[in-house]
Amino acid sequence: MTLARHTGAALLVAVVIFVLTIRLGPFRDYQIAEVAAYVTAVAGLTYLIGLSGQISIGHGAFMAIGAYASALLLLHLHWPLEAVFATSALAGAAAGGIIGVAAARLRGPYLAGATLLLAVALPSLADKYAGVFGGDQGLSVSVTTPAWLGVSFPPTRWLAWLTCAAALVTLVLLANLGRSRIGRSWRALRDNEVAASLAGLNVARMQILAFVVSSACAGLGGALLAVVTDIVSPGNFTLTLSISLLTAAILGGLGSLAGALWGGLVLVFVPTYVQDVATSHGLSSAASSNVPIAAYGVVLILVMLLFPSGIQGGLRRLLGPVAPAASAPFNALRRHAPASEHQEEGTT
Amino acid sequence: MKRTHRANLALVAGTAVTAMVIAACGSSGTSTPSSSPSAGASSSSSAALTASAPGITATTITIGSHQPLTGVAAPGYDEIAPASNAYFQYVNAHGGIYGRKIVYKFLNDQYNPTDTSTVVHQLVLQDNVYAIFNGLGTPTHLAVAPFLNAQKVPDVFVASGCECWNAPAKWPDTYGWQLDYIREGKILGQYVAQHFKGKKIGYFSQDDEFGMDGVKGLDDEIPKSQVVARQTYNPTNVNVGPQVAALKAAGAQVVISFSVPAFTALLQLTSLKLKFSPQLVVSDVGSDPTTLGGLLAAFGKSKKLSALTSGIITDGYLPSLGSTNNSWITLFKKIHAQYIPKLPFDGNVAYGLAAGYTFVQAMFKAGRNPTRQDLLNAINGGLPQGPSVAPYAYSATDHNGITGAYIAIIKNGALVQKGPVLVTDTSSSGAITPYTTAQPPAPASGIPAP
């Protein structure tokens, strides 16, 4: 049932995206593809933090793992894209499993520190093993538009379709997971680990699972970003990226998939928009190039002051009485979490 | 004379029109057919200016670039695009290119390939630029070279010495400009091999294409037995203590450094701390005396330390900024003082001005109403030597730019040339020969002849 509803919503979004990609220009299509890549990664992260209560400042590293996996597969084995994306997600998941084992033993700032280390250290492996990973200049990734679309089909529109399809599949799966027994278990241990453990939940196992799921999303997001930007190099996966993912998740509203979408939109559109405004007002290059960074900070501060629970949380509060469905997941969870656990197991 | 169907062009009165008329007359006086590769309507000097290609209108040529305007690579490098833009403004004020004004839109990519990809897609797909000019950085530009070639957007004069831009079969639209690091390594290596016979030599290089290409050139010239240590650094790790200690332990008497300015400074300050004082040889990229001196003073927290630049052996492919009798430097100083007086007059500014000049050369040669292919044809036909001390390599089969440099020693914050300009190729067997033809002076107008 839930699966059908989520799939229906995804199909609706797919139609909207389809119309947008046809009506907007090629650069907007490129930006839509970028948003899809970020949303995929942020969605996983927002579940990790918002649902399971663990933090990661190193999700850029999982994106790097997925991106390098996809680049190597495309470069050497020429796999079809679906297989490449699936494998990249698996590569992210595998790495997440390993980190998750360590993460399950760490709490709060210690976990933040450990994941931070990952974000800083991992990209330099590409320099260390330059023979495989191409060193500082990285590996180039190229995706050709399929022949059946015709030669004059805009490549960026194809990219937008490709990445949005992958992102939507991820979101549907995540939405179902969040409504399932697993999602409820995560919320339980987020709210009170001791209580969750007393209720019979294996806390460490559920925490590792949260890491696996969220890093699988990051791995896929990395693969999507790789095909969008045509290149995978250490410079793509700086600490800034990891922190941007975190801010996007917080800005959008932790634990909310719609929030992940808001976060992705902010990440992609705010800098470009502000830069355009700054240059069109005749600011010098030194000034206009710093304005987007400042604007990003201002947006972050404003959202935190006005909507402490993120953009999606703010929308819920504003539209709350009119649209109760928006807050339904949380209420539903509280209402029948313990009772219906076994009945809903099959929905994932 | 000039005919146009646009009524609003009549508003462009006074100096602008006069300048355009002068430009048009100037071009009719010279032998346009030979310099224009595509004979036809576009080469006729009386033809109306048309929107002959994306990014070109009857009045403007819009080009774009990606540059590190903020972030780690910004200090120094953020002066390059404003300097190129200053040269374009100078050309615009003196008649433009066949009357068209250059609009240069350079966007910040923070030296991050993801951002590079975004801004270049924006420039090509949304802003419809005619060409990407002087995009800065190896890893950054590698992210967009395949896209630009797939879109057939001229990708001219990349601001990186990677030999990878010279791939006419794979990337017909991409052209290098500055002296590539292999040639540079060979020229520096030959000097060291000749002047420090039997001395112990150590390498200090960045662990990417830049360092590797440089070392490849050095190894072509320096006997392997003389090299006692090969140290590399990663630009994200500012602790170079272990590398410097290893160079010292190996007893290196000469250290050759393929480093960016910040790491040349770190190498010097760490050496000072470890009481290690080899003869330093630094590639052009990491030795601009103004930038390096500033970094030494800032990192070491003492103004006196900027004097450490003295005695460094380096090379230069543009005339030394200190030479008072060089017409190019005179021209550059004039444009600098008029358009970008707030920036220091250093190697980065000279670089940007010189690259801008080369673009204007190529655009004049591409003809009055150029297509994108006309620009490629113009460069493939070779460009006359401009502000660089050695000629360009450009041909249909060679997309490298400047082919040589002179050896110099830094003295009182300026390069002092030692010996002749040396030219070579990128092969390991290619000879290094003196280039004795005198550099042609800058045109009196400051603008290349069409």
Image: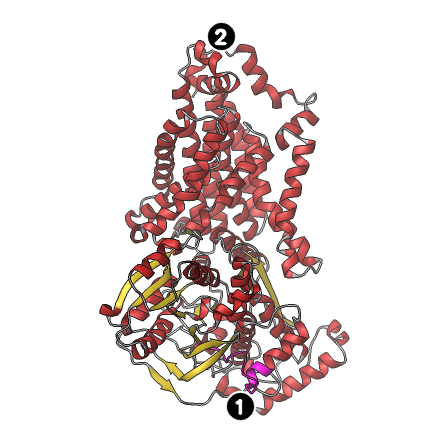
Q: Nearer the viewer, residue B14 or B88?
A: B88
Q: Answer with the quarter of the image where residue B231 lies.
A: bottom left
Q: How is the image coloured?
A: secondary structure
Q: Answer with the quarter of the image where residue A173 lies.
A: top left
Residue B218 sits above or below residue A93 on the image: below
Q: Which residues are magenta?
A: B316-330
Residue beneath disc 2: A339
Q: What is the residue that sits farthest to the left in this orientation?
A: B225
Element class at badge 2: loop
Q: What chain does mark 1 sit on?
A: B
Q: Position of residue B131 (x, y in %)?
A: 53, 67
Asked whether the viewer can see residue A288, the reply is yes
Residue B78 sits above or below residue B439 on the image: above
Left of A315 or right of it: where is A263? left
Between disc 2 and disc 1, the foreground one is 2
Tell me how far mark 2 sits from mark 1, CA to CA. Answer: 91 Å
Query: What is the magenta segment's predominant secondary structure?
Result: loop
Left of A124 or right of it: where is B310? right
Residue beneath disc 1: B31
The three-letter code of the residue at mark 1 reads Ser
Element class at badge 1: loop
The three-letter code of the residue at mark 2 reads Ala
